[in-house]
Amino acid sequence: MIEYFVPGASTYAGDIDFLFDMITVIVGFWFVMVLAVMTYFMVRFRRKEGVRAAYISGDPHSQKKWTHYPHYSVIALDVVIIVFTVMVWVDVKQTLPQAEDKIRVVGQQWSWFFIHSGPDGKLDTEDDISTVNDLHVKKDTVYHFELESRDVLHNFSVPAFRLRQDTIPGRTITGWFEPNKTGIYDIQCAEICGYGHGIMGATIVVHEDQQSYDAAMESIRNRTYESDYQKRLQKMTVSTASNSESFTDKLLSSF
């Protein structure tokens, strides 16, 4: 269901969405069932004139079974959730497929610093390319990222990839993703990291092919690249200002 609000753009986004859907359906089923039973009991056994209330202890087995059976069912479904959760966790967090390219992501108050590997596909070499708040990747390419923090706890969150990972000062955390849809997607900090936390955003651009990616990298080297993050900020600013003016006009016209 979440994919209708935030489209998935990575190979394991569908697995994460499946977990959300499964948990929502299971929990929702028991929620509706409990409400239905409670409503039925309130109506069926409501206070009536001339009918005395009966004290039910719940000790006899014939009465206990009505709590035991649902309890066993809930436990069984909990086991199902745990099994699928562990499977997805192992696939996403503990299994690193062979890397086709590497990037370094550094969080700092209050921006994201990215280092793209050059043509050699290795970090910390002369052909590395650095950007601030703009990350560029290629579609259908497996990336390993090295996640670091220069100051406090941050959280590297790419909602379209269903990716969230804390950054911890003094540690380098390795993870992976494989984009499978082109486009420009939001990067967020999902860990409160100070008074500038709300503006700590960035964008990730998924290029269709190597040619598009190389063109972007070349423009960054030549300092002619127009930041996609800044473009999005400008659009948001214009949209917010337009909505604000529209609201003000409507408010004034009502007097």
Image (spheres, rainbow, N blue to C red):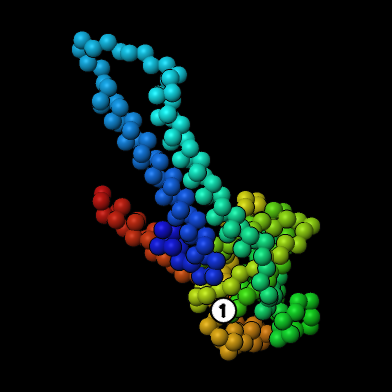
User: Hey, which quadrant is residue 31 in on the image?
Assistant: top left
Task: Identify which residue is drawn at 46% across, 40% down.
Answer: 73
Asked if residue 114 can be seen in this view, the reply is no
Question: Outermost residue, left direction?
Answer: 49
| Image position of 82 (left or right of 18) | right
Q: Return the residue nearer the eye: 198 or 171.
A: 171
Task: Identify which residue is drawn at 48% across, 45% down.
Answer: 77
Residue holding disc 1: 140
Task: Identify which residue is drawn at 69% across, 53% down.
Answer: 153
Measured as percent of width and height from the top left, residue 7 is found at: 45, 66
| Image position of 252 (left or right of 112) | left
In this figure, what is the number of numbered marks? Answer: 1
Measured as percent of width and height from the top left, residue 42 is found at: 29, 26
Q: Return the residue nearer the eye: 132 or 81.
A: 81
Asked if residue 63 can be seen in this view, the reply is yes
Measured as percent of width and height from the top left, residue 105 is found at: 69, 67
Disc 1 packing (10 Å; few <14; some 14–19; many ≥20): some
Vertical side of 73 occupied by 243: above or below: below
| Image position of 135 (left or right of 80) | right
Three-letter amino acid code at the position of disc 1: Asp
Q: Return the residue nearer the eye: 183 or 14.
A: 14
**Quadrant of the snapshot with the N terminus:** bottom left
Q: Secondary structure at mark 1?
A: loop
User: Hey, which quadrant is residue 155 in on the image?
Assistant: bottom right
Measured as percent of width and height from the top left, residue 128 is found at: 73, 80
Task: Identify which residue is drawn at 34% across, 30% down.
Answer: 38
Vertical side of 80 occupied by 137: above or below: below
Vertical side of 68 occupied by 106: above or below: below
